[in-house]
Image: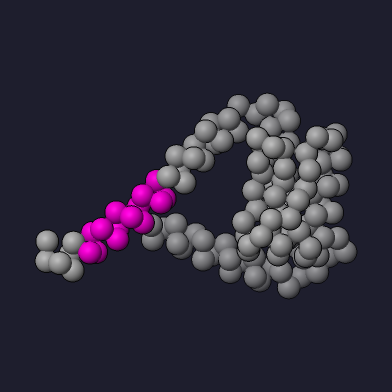
Amino acid sequence: MLLSWLVSARMKSRFSEYSQIPIPVTGREVAEQMLKDNHITDVKVISTPGHLTDHYNPANKTVNLSESVYNSNSIAAAAVAAHEVGHAVQHAQAYHWLGLRSALVPIVQLSSNLVGMVLMIGIVLLAMGG
């Protein structure tokens, strides 16, 4: 859990740092151009609420860019947008490891939720002297 927190903190710090370097295009424009360059016409680029909630959804073929990436014209936004489009390119090329990654997403999400609950139960039991 500590490692996950450290990685997340480092990523947010880097994103913040590189968000200060402007470029002439937005994250949305980078994503759309990359899809066009790779001849992918059935994937939509959409804005999603939150900060760094970016992801590619192979089920509905959308590149979901957080508001801080979609509308931003920074190096950080371009990098995040390019990363997410990379998953769409992998999907279009039937990259076999993408299937494994997609299958693991629900398991990782469930595990993440369970860890939080188990931690809370442990804290409560410890506080009760058990």
Return the x and y of residue 10 as percentages of the image width and height: 54, 65
Applied colour scheme = one colour
Q: In the rendered view, would you say 41 is above or below 123? A: above
Based on the displayed image, in which of its 4 quarters is residue 78 positioned? bottom right
Q: In the rendered view, would you say 12 is above or below 63? A: below
Q: In the rendered view, would you say 90 is above or below 32? A: above
Q: How many marks?
A: 0
Residue at 49 percent across and 40 percent down: it is 106
Based on the displayed image, in which of its 4 quarters is residue 75 positioned? bottom right
The chief SS type of the magenta part is helix
Q: Would you say residue 112 sits in the magenta stretch? A: yes
Return the x and y of residue 96 as percentages of the image width and height: 60, 27
Return the x and y of residue 70 as percentages of the image width and height: 76, 59
Residue at 46 percent across and 63 percent down: it is 6
Q: In the rendered view, would you say 20 is above or below 6? A: below
Residue at 77 percent across and 65 percent down: it is 72
Q: Start and end of the magenta stretch?
A: 111-124
Residue at 71 percent across and 62 percent down: it is 67
Q: In the picture, which quadrant includes the C terminus? A: bottom left
44 with respect to 103 (left or right) = right
28 with respect to 67 (left or right) = right
Residue 97 visible from this viewpoint:
no
